[in-house]
Structures are given as structure tokens and as C-alpha cells.
Image: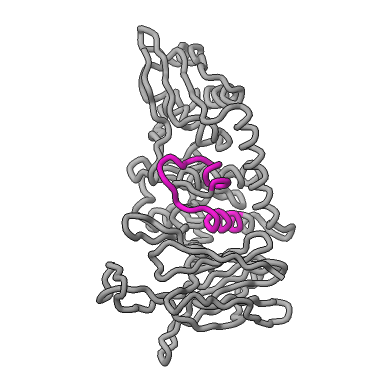
Amino acid sequence: MKKLIPILLSAVMMLTCLTFTASADVASDELAPYIKNKLESGETDIDISDFTGRYGWGVDETVNEIIASAFFENPDLFYVDNKFNYIADIDGKVRSIEFAYTMTASQREAAQKKLDSAIQKMLSGITSDMNDVDKALYVHDYLVLNCKYGTMSQHTSYDCIVNKKSVCQGYSLAYEYIMRDYLGIDCTVVFSRSQNHMWNYLKIGGKWYHVDLTLDDPGAAYNGSTYDLWGLVLHKNFLMSDSQCRSSSELHSGWIVSGGYGAASDTSYDNAFWKNIRAHICFLGGKYYYAADTGKDESSGQRIITVYSYNKSTGKAKALLRTKSKWFSRRVNGSTAVAAYGTKVYTTGYLSLDTYGGKLYFNTNKSVYSYDPSTGKTKRIYTLNKGEDKQIFGLVTVGDYVRLAYKEDVTYPEKYISLKMK
């Protein structure tokens, strides 16, 4: 008897629910590592008759649940296909499981090197003065800045970190992989079958919190496609308690924590300073730096964007500089329909912030500036000369470059310019 089982779906989420029975909970501690070891060895037909004989598993969801658990707890299994066959005896007991691989052994080895290299590049921005919260925030922002929401077939840690396109499963597995296996901070995944969504469970200071990178990666829809908002990072879903998680989104309900950890009852970060920040939070010299839209200049209609430093020790923010700019969207009568030559409606600020060489870099709708925290000096380093209707909607530093996105409207796909640092 053979049956094909999809263990990982891929949309907003991608899995069969792991509602364990008591016996499956205990047995998964044995079977999941066993399956992982076999997959790492490249085996395609894995005999589990010893387990099914002891626990009486038949052709039901129990084995599927445990195998899914093995995948969720081992994000380095990115090279295994997301479907499997299980083979049962005539009496219905599962005898073996057939897996397929998306990569050959040599391709897997090369892919693992690419993955390790990409992660090491990411972690090069972590400094010795960062605590676990700082590291968790840094990785959260890095993945959101560098990954776009993808398609159903893009659901692995490799897709998120190397290919930079993924659905929520890839975001979650990538965060788990980096936080747990590279930084030594306990992290697992959370999923809701009813909401078809997955996110993370992170342990900081002995307490658990929810982190949802997917919902913190803003995008805009146009003509049936979703475009990434380059340089923007939300923080509403970073270090949530159970109560805040439940109220933060309709996608956060009916969840199960892979691994069965305790509740996230601590509310210490539910009102943290980062909750309403829409730009990258940078870390320099023991301080956070961030930008926020702080209102409208009534005389000019421009948005006022303020760049702050935040002292962790005192919990106080200090305004460092303010700039004014005017980002617009083309809309008709304020509706969501985008018109080619419709009325310009001025919208919220799209200033992004990033660091390089001890300086901060940020954008207005037409220019890019550097700011030196040690001297307080601001310098304009670039002006966009692409016509009146082109605006800068965000920037990110990539290596020795500042990469900025420009377009005609927040809903249109971006075009990019990379500026070499001096």
C-alpha cells in the first residue's frame, strides 16, 4: 500500500497540523531524530517498522505529524522534497517511508556552503556589545530587509536566506536556523492550521515570545502581484506575549508550538519602543537608531521625519535630526484604484535607515543623506534625477553600496540604483 502525503504546503503557510496524541508525543522524540539522521545520509526508503510495531501506527496522520515535526525542528533539511510516500503492510501498519530530494549530493554540498556563507555575512553585523534582544532584533530586520514574500514552492530556509524569496514557512525556518543553530538562542516554530500561517517562538531571558517576520515584511498589491516595500520593516510582531499575539492579527489564532513549549505569558515587550517603527532599527555604539514619521507640516503638506537615538539603559529616545519630504500615490478620489494620471494623494513617509562605516544613511523622496552620530553632521550624497514622478521609497546598505529603490507609486514594482560608498 502506497500513499503520497504532502507534509509541507506552501501558501501563507504550508503544513498538516501537528495535533499530537499522547503516544505520538513520546514517540516523536525517537522517530524524528531517526528520520533526520537517515535523510542526512541521503536514504530514500526509510524503514520505520520498529517504531510502528511498538506504537501501533497505521495509515493515519500520526506518522505524517511526526515527520512534519522533524522538518520544522530541522530547518537544515532544505534539500528534501516536501512530499513523501509511506508504504504500509496489508494490516495497515506503516512499514517504510519513501522520500525524494530536490538536490543531488554535490548540489546539496554546494548549497550548504552558500547557505553558511550567506549566514556568516549576515552575522558579521553582530557586535560584542549586543545582548540577545539586540541579536534577535538584528536578525529579524536583516531577513525582512533582504527577503521578499514568494510563491508556494519557496518555503525553505535556503529560499529565504540565499534565494531571498519565501512564504512564511521559509521566513520561520530561516529565523529558527540562525537564532538557534548559529547564535545559540532557543527558537522554534509556531503554526496555525486554521489560519494557514507559521511564525516563530523565541526564548529570551528564560521566557518565550512570539516573532512573526512575515507580517513584519510590508508589501503592496497591484495588478494581482505583491511588491516588496524596499527598506521598510515593521516591528509590531516582534517579541509578543500570547495575549498580544492573539490580538495583533487575525492570522494569530489556534496556534500550536512545535516542540510543546510553555506559554508566552510575559508582557515586558508588549509596549516596547519598536512596536510602531516602520523603518530598520540600527545598532551603533550600544544605542539604537531609528526613524519615524512624526506628523505633517501644514504649510507645505510635507511629512516630518525624525531620526532618533534610543538609550537602552535609560529607556529614553533623543531626536537627532528632522527632515521634510512629500511622498505621493496616484489615486482617484482616495480610492484604492490606481490611475495612470490620477490625482496625487500625499501619503505617509517612506524614509529608510541603515548603517555603514559608523554612519547612518537615510532617504527623503528625492535624496540620500549620511549622518555621522559622532559629529552630528548631515551630508547629502545623492539626488534622484529621474523625472518629477519618480520618488525614492527606501534604501538598504549592501556591502560597500547603498541600494535605493525608486518608482512612481508605492504600489508599483521597484527600480534600483546602487551607490558606491566613499
Most foreground residue, 343 or 350: 343
Most foreground residue, 404 or 57: 404
Q: Is 15 a magenta residue?
A: no
Q: Magenta region: which residues? A: 136-163
Q: Residue furthest top?
A: 90
Identify the residue shown where x is 55% and y is 67%.
404
Predominant secondary structure in magenta? helix
Most foreground residue, 286 or 104: 104
Identify the residue shown where x is 69% and y is 77%.
372
Identify the residue shown where x is 44% and y is 48%.
150
Q: Quadrant of residue 56?
A: top left
266 to 98, vertically: above or below: below
57 to 366, vertically: above or below: above
Residue 41 x, y percent position in the rendering = 61, 22
Relative placement, left or right, of 422 versus 380 is right
Residue 154 x, y percent position in the rendering = 46, 42
